[in-house]
Amino acid sequence: MTNHLGSCLCGTVSFEIKGDFDSFYLCHCQHCQKDTGSAHAANLFSQSANLVWRSGADAVASFTLSGTRHSKSFCKLCGSALPNTQIPGLLVVPAGCLDTEISMPPTAHIFLSSKAAWDDKLGKVPEFEGLPD
């Protein structure tokens, strides 16, 4: 069994995930594009791991899009994405909120039929180690 630590950007919320992840999906659906502001969401899923809030549980808010299973949790202060338990029996953890290494590679890209038009061009974009001059 693996343990992972994570937190929000402002440090108010911290948590521990006790257990293993079943899958790691890069979701390109329009809902994930809207709630991340990016080309896709990177979420880890587990049906057996346990979430323990170490600090700031009162600063966690959740939103579920009406008529869908799309849900997200976030810090009320800084807006950082946080683990979500709104779907019964499923823990969804945004990969970017973890402070510990993720050894699992992404399982798959999903909902590619909805992917952003500019997503195909990412391989041709210049890369920099930091902010360009």
Image (cartoon, rainbow, N blue to C red):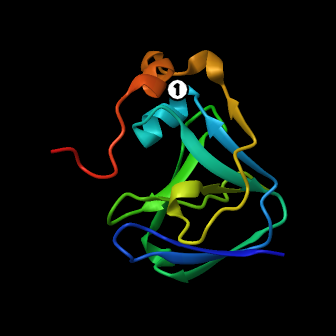
Please name whichever residue, 131 or 49, is drawn nearer the observer in this view of the structure: 131
Q: Position of residue 56 (x, y in %)?
A: 46, 79
* Residue position for label 1: 30
Q: How many marks?
A: 1
Indicate the secondary structure of the residue bearing disc 1.
helix
Please name whichever residue, 42 or 46, is drawn nearer the observer in this view of the structure: 42
Would residue 2 appear left or right of 66 to someone viewing this image? right
The type of residue carrying mark 1 is: Gln
Q: Residue at x 79, y 68 (%)?
A: 49
**Quarter placement of the C terminus:** top left
Q: Residue at x 61, y 67 (%)?
A: 101
Q: Position of residue 20 (x, y in %)?
A: 80, 66
Residue 125's quadrant in the figure?
top left
Q: Residue at x 51, y 62 (%)?
A: 97
Q: Is residue 54 above or below residue 108?
A: below
Q: Which residue of the protein is positioned furthest toward the bottom in this rendering?
A: 54
Would residue 106 appear left or right of 126 to someone viewing this image? right
Q: Is residue 101 above or below residue 38?
A: below
Q: Position of residue 74 (x, y in %)?
A: 46, 59
